[in-house]
Image (tube, grey):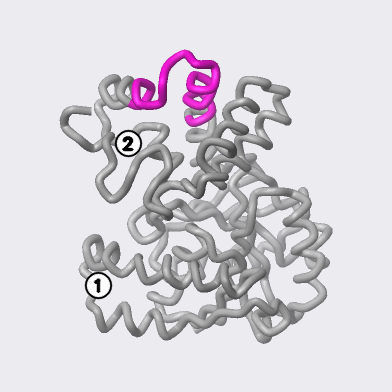
């Protein structure tokens, strides 16, 4: 059993923490404020029904996993004797750099650092960790318990033994590790999904069509029930905003920037963050895109 710290108690951080605890590792969830941790704890409780439905988990198993998780808003205490820290904080490079500078000074020498960053490369902030050889990317998918692949990506300075240890850890928490041979912005999954979401946001931001029409087009054309704006709701509008804002700046894309800003103003600032809050583009638990008449 390893002691695993998950930094960030948002949608994905909460899922990573519970998946790890469900597979018998001790977990500490760290976040900046106790109020964030309370919200994270509630997100974890809400996962119980998902695990029962999708994994046939028993209440006894879920209760046991829940007791494996503790919470701390003091980083020094959270990382004491940690084997692995999985960082799942906002997708902002300066926020990540500042976090790793602090983490590197506080964590034991043995601790391996993993970033769950969706679009940033580990080499962009490896120096700030003060242990680049023990740093790599470990990228989880939303719906960790059922979308069971995890992308393991080294940077040039990652020690081979550390890479192999994280591959083994990934298997120990019930996931299938996909080993990337080199750094790739967005890994494999987001290299495919980010352009898809960006295309949908551009159409919406440029008033080509409303989001329902865009989603309906995708559903019918691709014979699916999971369109782009439903995907945004699932990953969380904060995450989508950060990714699209970064991408719009990188590509000098004014329409995509307009879409990102519209996400913030029309949804995020009104507390509509997606599935996690019960409303984003759609209302949950019965979103309109699943309706037969959609």
What residue is rendered at 67% in x and 62% in y? Answer: 160
Disc 1 secondary structure class: loop
Magenta: predominant secondary structure element? Answer: helix
Where is residue 158? Give x, y as percent.
72, 59
- Pick whichever, 2 or 291, lies toward us: 291
| Location of mark 1 (residue) | 57
Q: Which residues are magenta?
A: 197-215
197 left or right, relative to 54 = right
Disc 2 secondary structure class: loop
| Location of mark 2 (residue) | 226
Q: Which mark is residue 167?
A: none
Q: Residue furthest left?
A: 292
Dot 2 surroundings within 10 Å: few (below 14), some, or many (20 or more)?
Answer: some
265 left or right, relative to 292 = right
From the image, state whether disc 1 or disc 2 is nearer to you.
Answer: 2
Is residue 150 visible in this depiction of the protein?
Answer: yes
What residue is rendered at 73% in x and 23% in y? Answer: 252
Q: Earlier in the sequence, mark 1 or mark 2?
A: 1
27 shown above or below 153:
below
């Amino acid at each position: 059993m390893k002691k695993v710290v998950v930094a960030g108690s948002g949608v994905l951080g909460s899922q990573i923490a519970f998946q790890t605890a469900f597979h018998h590792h001790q977990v500490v969830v760290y976040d900046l404020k106790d109020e964030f941790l309370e919200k994270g704890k509630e997100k974890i409780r809400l996962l119980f029904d998902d695990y029962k439905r999708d994994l046939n988990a028993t209440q006894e198993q879920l209760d046991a996993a829940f007791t494996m998780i503790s919470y701390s808003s003091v980083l020094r205490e959270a990382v004491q004797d940690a084997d692995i820290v999985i960082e799942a904080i906002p997708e902002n490079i300066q926020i990540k750099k500042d976090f790793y500078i602090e983490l590197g000074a506080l964590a034991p020498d043995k601790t391996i650092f993993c970033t769950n960053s969706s679009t940033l490369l580990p080499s962009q902030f490896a120096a700030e960790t003060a242990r680049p050889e023990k740093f790599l990317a470990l990228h989880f998918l939303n719906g960790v318990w059922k979308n069971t692949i995890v992308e393991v990506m080294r940077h040039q300075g990652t020690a081979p033994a550390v890479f192999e240890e994280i591959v083994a850890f990934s298997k120990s928490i019930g996931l299938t590790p996909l080993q990337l041979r080199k750094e790739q912005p967005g890994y494999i999954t987001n290299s495919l999904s980010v352009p898809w979401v960006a295309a949908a946001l551009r159409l919406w931001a440029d008033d080509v069509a409303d989001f329902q029409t865009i989603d309906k087009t995708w559903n019918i054309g691709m014979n699916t029930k999971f369109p782009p704006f439903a995907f945004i709701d699932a990953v969380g509008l904060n995450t989508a905003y950060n990714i699209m804002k970064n991408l719009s700046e990188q590509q000098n894309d004014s329409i995509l920037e307009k879409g990102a800003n519209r996400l913030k103003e029309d949804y995020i600032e009104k507390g509509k963050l997606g599935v996690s809050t019960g409303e984003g583009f759609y209302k949950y638990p019965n979103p309109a895109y699943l309706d037969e008449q959609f």
